[in-house]
Amino acid sequence: MALVHGIPIIPTDKISMLLDVENPVSYPGSGSTWTCLVDGRNFQATGGTQTPLTTQDGNKCFQFNGSGFWESSENTDGVDMGGDCTLLMWIYQEDNTERDTIFEKVGPLYQSYQHEIAVTCEVGFSNVQNYTWYSRFSPNYDTASTAADFSNDEWHLLGIKMSTGRTSAARTGFYSRNGAAWAANYNSRSNTALVSAGNIRVGSGYAGEMENGKIAMVATYNKMLSDLEVEGFYNATRKRLGL
C-alpha cells in the first residue's frame, strides 16, 4: 500500500483508475473535466445538466440529478473490467424510484451489460437499496447482485470484483460493503469469451442516468482485491467521510 496523490495507504498494485472529487488534482472545484489520478485520463461532463458539486459530511462530491453524467474515451482498455478486476465506489445513498445505471463500459456490439460490466442501482424498499451487475453475452449474459443493505442517507463503499471473462470458463463475482470480506453472488450463464467494451461512464448507462445520490470516489483495479486489500482501502478513505 502507498500514497496516491494525497490519498494515504490505499492498495496500488494494478490500480487502473482513481477519480476523487475531493482531490483538487482530480477535480479543481469547477469545470467539466474530472481527471484520473493514476494516468491523467479525463472524464467529461456529459448529458443535460452537469452533476453539481456539493458537500456531504464535510466531503466534496457530485450530486446525481437524473441528467448529467461523466464519460471518458481515453485509454479505456487500461480499465480492463473484462479480465480479473475490482470496482470500488464511495456512494452516498439516496432514494431512487427507478432503476438507473451508476457505472458501465459502453459496448460496441451489444448492450453494455453484455460486454465487460454494467452496474445498476435498483429501486429501494424500506429505505434500503441494492445493486446488480452484469457481464458477457452468449448464450446469455451473467447476472449478479449485492444484498439489500445499502441504507439511504448514508455513505457506503460499494465493492464489486470478478474473475476474468475472457475465456470460455465460468466467470465468478463477489461484492463487499464498507470493506467487509468479499461475499460470492454471481450467476454465470455464458460460456463464451466476452467482447471488449469501450467508453467508461459514471452515473449513467443502459438503464438511464442516476436520479439521486452522491458520489465521491471511483477506483478500479486490473486484479481481484483480497479481503485484506478491500478492508485497507475502506480504512484509508472512510475517516474523511465521517465513518
Image (spheres, grey):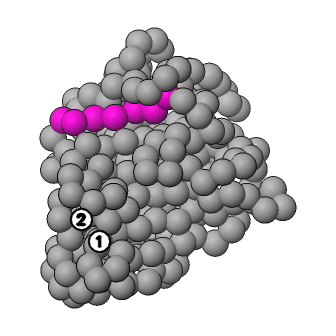
- Local crowd at mark 1 within 10 Å, few (<14), some, or many (≥20)? many
The image quarter containing residue 8 is top left
Residue 107 in the image: x percent, y percent?
26, 54
Per the image, label 2 sits on a secondary structure element best described as loop
Per the image, label 1 sits on a secondary structure element best described as loop
Instruction: Name the residue located 39 percent from the left edge and 17 percent from the top edge.
Output: 32
Q: Is residue 228 visible?
A: no
Label 2 is placed on what type of residue? Gly
Left or right: 110 in relation to 24: left
Specify the segment rendered in magenta.
68-74
Disc number for residue 136 = 1
Marks 2 and 1, Cα distance to the nearest angstrom?
9 Å
Main SS of the magenta part reads: strand
Give yes or no for contact between labels 2 and 1 (Cβ–Cβ under 8 Å): no
Disc number for residue 238 = none
Label 1 is placed on what type of residue? Arg
Please say whether residue 123 is one of the residues in the magenta stretch. no
Instruction: Name the residue located 44 percent from the left edge and 27 percent from the top edge.
Output: 47
Furthest toward the top, the residue is 30
Q: Is residue 112 above or below residue 219?
A: below
Q: Nearer the viewer, residue 13 or 113?
A: 113
Residue 108 in the image: x percent, y percent?
20, 52
The residue identified by callout 2 is 82
Q: Is residue 205 above or below residue 85?
A: above
Task: Tell me which numbered mark, 2 or 1, is placed earlier along the sequence.
Answer: 2
- Local crowd at mark 2 within 10 Å, few (<14), some, or many (≥20)? many
